Amino acid sequence: MTDVQTSSNDPLAVAVRSLPGRLLQPQQGDTIYRQDEAGEHLFLIVAGYIKLTQVDRDGAERIAGILDSDELFGLCGENGAREHNAIAKGRTRLYRVAQRDFRGLMEKRSDLVWPVVESLSRRQRLAERRLQALLAQDVRGRIATALHDLVAHYGGRCRHGHEIDVPLTQQEVAEMVGASRPVVSAVLNEWRRDNLLSYTRNYICVNDLATLRDLSIVSSS
């Protein structure tokens, strides 16, 4: 077992770190694996963030999710292939374990199965809500929905003096909501003037999560 130093007390993360594995430290933009690749390992995020993207039939790449510390990713689909691209956001630390060892852990520790199910279900709910927003809302509503969900689930105490922040660039917001970067920039600039949020090069900083919720599809679901 690799010695992974972390302050996390999450039972699932602790159990995964007890398995034989390897500590990886990818840098900003490094690809962990690509969509449709065969995979024998899965990954625990020890520190940092991972961006999951998916390429559709037309070749367009969209962000499927942003994952935070203690989350697992890399489980293969029924055909044994990866369903997403996984890309490091900033300096990241990952613990890689064999999928067969993880399956053995689940067989021995039935108490850990439900946390895995909850995590996957949460990601599915967020993906379905973004799809619903894409079909039913204009760009403003889609941006509000994407930001609200990411901030609510993955946001941390803002290091820039605002209420809360999430590691996301304007280009990544555009990829999530199916809009161009100039359109997203115009909406974010308007909301910044209204003091709803602010942003830096790599972070969206939210001042008023309640108002953001009112603008999103969440308020009507």
Image: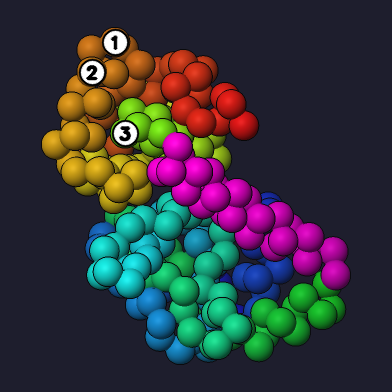
Q: Is 131 situated left or right of 98 in this image?
A: left
Label 3 to label 1: alpha-carbon separation:
18 Å
If the image is split into quadrants, where does the N terminus sit?
bottom right
Q: Amino acid at mark 3?
A: Val
Tag 1 and tag 2, C-beta contact below 8 Å: yes
Give the farthest residue toward the front: 136
**Tag 1, which secondary structure?**
loop
Can residue 35 be seen in the rendering of this structure?
Answer: yes
Give the mark toward the camera: 3 or 2.
3
Side (left or right) of 3 relative to 188: right
| Left or right position of 88 against 115 | left
Residue type beneath disc 1:
Asp
Q: Earlier in the sequence, mark 3 or mark 1?
A: 3
The first of marks 3 and 2 along the sequence is: 3
In the picture shown, does residue 154 fall above or below 51? above
Image: magenta residue range:
110-136
Read off the residue under disc 2: 190
Pointer 1: what residue? Answer: 194
Residue drawn 84% across the image and 78% down it: 108
> From the viewer's perspective, is 214 left or right of 186?
right
Hey, what amino acid is under mark 2? Answer: Glu
Q: Is residue 185 above or below residue 2?
A: above
Image coords of residue 102 (percent x, y): 67, 79
Q: Residue at x 30, y 55 (%)?
A: 90
Q: Nearer the viewer, residue 138 or 170?
A: 138
Q: Residue 205 appears at what percent x and percent y?
A: 35, 28
- Which residue sits furthest left? 182
Q: Which mark is residue 139?
A: 3
Residue at (35%, 48%) from the top-left corner? 176
Tell me the residue at 66%/88% (across/down): 100
- Image quadrant of residue 207? top left
